[in-house]
Image: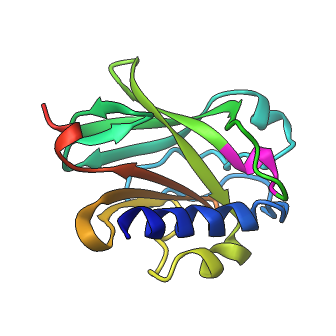
Amino acid sequence: MKRVMFATVLAAAFAVGSVAAQQPAGQQPTGSGQQTATTAPRPGDASAQRTVSLGTVRIGRNVMADGKPLKAGSYQVRLTPEEAKPEVAGTDAKLERWVEFTRGGKVMGREVVSIVPQDEIAKIAKARPPRPGTSRVELLKGNDYLRVWINKGGTHYLIHMPTGAAATD
């Protein structure tokens, strides 16, 4: 059941992938000091070809990132130009990419992120989104997954990581 819920969330995110992200140009204000002041990358633009900082998040428990343990702590989250593979039919690969969790300049873990445009987020997540320039880390129903939700310039970045015994010290 828990895997079905996660698969449903991911399937919904993939369905949105076919819609191109719309975003205003220029800089966005920073929120709670967690994010940088640069605009989030649009799929297909030059920033999609480089690593972009999405901000700093505090993960309050051990999780699994790309099948490997990621310890609780604060991490800088960077969006990479690497697209998630394999592609799912009917999706835009540029909206499923990899993020890196770094500390002290060293990559501690990585995971797939779903990039969701502002006008599509209500179809994906029932919870109220974080304000632009901020992030939220929350346990999902059943405490089986941790969601890192970053809102940068009105574009939403959703990262889902399993919790549990496999992610312990």
- Left or right of 92 in this view: 63: left
Residue 72 shows in the view: no
> Residue 117 sits in which quadrant?
bottom right
- Left or right of 36 in this view: 57: left
Q: Position of residue 147 (x, y in %)?
A: 39, 58
Q: Is residue 5 above or below residue 57?
A: below
Residue visible at 73% across and 77% down in the picture: 119
Q: Is residue 167 above or below residue 35?
A: above
Residue visible at 46% across and 43% down in the picture: 55
Number of marks in the rendered image: 0
- Left or right of 37 in this view: 120: right
Q: Position of residue 28 (x, y in %)?
A: 63, 57
> Residue 138 sits in which quadrant?
bottom left
**Residue 149 within the magenta-colored segment of the rendering:** no
Q: Position of residue 163 (x, y in %)?
A: 26, 50
Q: Which residues are magenta?
A: 91-96
Q: Is residue 140 above or below residue 50?
A: below
Residue 45 shows in the view: yes
